[in-house]
Image (cartoon, rainbow, N blue to C red):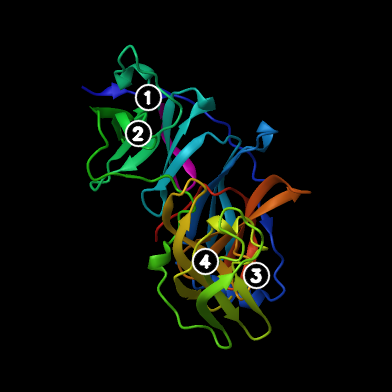
Amino acid sequence: MLRPFTVLGFTALAVTTLVFTTPTHAEERDLWLQRLPAGGVRFATQVYSSSDNAKHRFIIAEVSHTGMSLLAEENHADYQSFHWKDSRTLVALGDLNNSGQPFVQVYVDGKQSGVRISIPKASWELSPDQELGVLFDLRVDKKQNYWVGTCLAYDDNRPNTCKAYRALRADLATGTFDRLTRKVPPGSKDVRPLQSGLAPQKLGRLSAPDGYKVKLHKTDIADGSAMMGDGKKVPAFTCTGPSSSATWPSADVINWEFTTRPKTIRWVRHEPPMFIAEGPATNPIAETAPSYRVFRACSTQAMDDTVFGPHDLWLELEYELADVVVTGAHWVVNVGPVKLGQVPGSDLIAIAPE
């Protein structure tokens, strides 16, 4: 039996937050823009402000042959996840005001499509001792079905292991859901888009640009670190370029103990020169996982966050600081070596497929 969702609503804003960069060489910009797909490339991102709700933003933007434009801008930061179903269609999952009542909204070409639909608490079929939290998964299975899931209880002995799970399958066309499962749907994956663009392994491997060389080795970092030991040799690299050289990591790298231990180097762009250092990283509680950092030319510091799109499109997250306090962030949008402009955002970002 199909059970209906509940309709909610949001307020759209006038477009106000896009910042354009005046090109010094308009012809060069236009040549790089022509490399993009004819239909353009879209991305979605969100900004949360802990101090001012008026600064919350959800944004869908497009980069095309004519430049950059905003397709949607809304005054909220309620989305926990979103996923591009195709190059035009975005499926977004949120929890309105952290109420424990998740909802789904579909966007087509930057506009809300259909009703905004919410799952009533009773639909989860909770037992008397179970409580619905405020964290939800948006999952997609191999048949392109969308599921909304949540963990009701974790294993006390294994904090990251869920022992009581629920998921509801959504029919986006009818605004209903037609199946409840008490386990993670087979073949599904969580699609929360933290820095979701082209994965490093899909970027290919280029030869080093003319005049550049990166050599892997081990280096001593003598900073008196109690965690790693003063002067302990750690995996590192030295980049040598036409006008500078740098060794990374160094004592100047914040929390170098927990950053990537480079094992491979992959050049991914020539204009501008950009490469990825890949290797394991160990966090403060001794958990080790694959990781990577992105570098531009022979910089002494990795870029904060970088997302790669198709056809030389790439975005860099820059944090806005007041003294040492982070007050905001924005994505700088680039195609090749040309900066197009910037848009408010966070590491919750997803670039649409071609």
Q: Disc 3 vs disc 4: which is toward the camera?
A: 3
Q: Secondary structure at mark 1?
A: loop
User: Which residue matches tag 3?
Assistant: 300
Give the x, y percent position of residue 254: 64, 57
Label 3 close to label 4 by CB (< 8 Å): no
The image quarter in which residue 103 lies = top left
C-alpha span from label 1 to label 4: 37 Å
Q: Amino acid at mark 4?
A: Leu
Tell me the tag on residue 148.
2
C-alpha span from label 3 to label 4: 23 Å
Label 1 close to label 4 by CB (< 8 Å): no
Of callouts 1 and 2, the N-terminal one? 1
Q: Which residues are magenta?
A: 107-117
Residue 241 in view (yes/no): yes
Give the x, y percent position of residue 93: 43, 36
Q: Residue at x 31, y 20 (%)?
A: 123
C-alpha span from label 1 to label 2: 9 Å
Residue ranking furthest to the right:
323
Q: Amino acid at mark 2?
A: Val
Depth check: 107 or 320 in front? 320
Give neighbour class at mark 4: few <14, some 14-19, many 20+ (Cα, 10 Å): many
Q: Secondary structure at mark 3?
A: loop
SS majority, magenta = strand
Q: Amino acid at mark 3?
A: Thr
Of callouts 2 and 3, the N-terminal one? 2
User: Which residue matches tag 4?
Assistant: 313
C-alpha span from label 2 to label 3: 42 Å
C-alpha span from label 3 to label 1: 49 Å
User: Which residue matches tag 1?
Assistant: 119
C-alpha span from label 2 to label 4: 31 Å
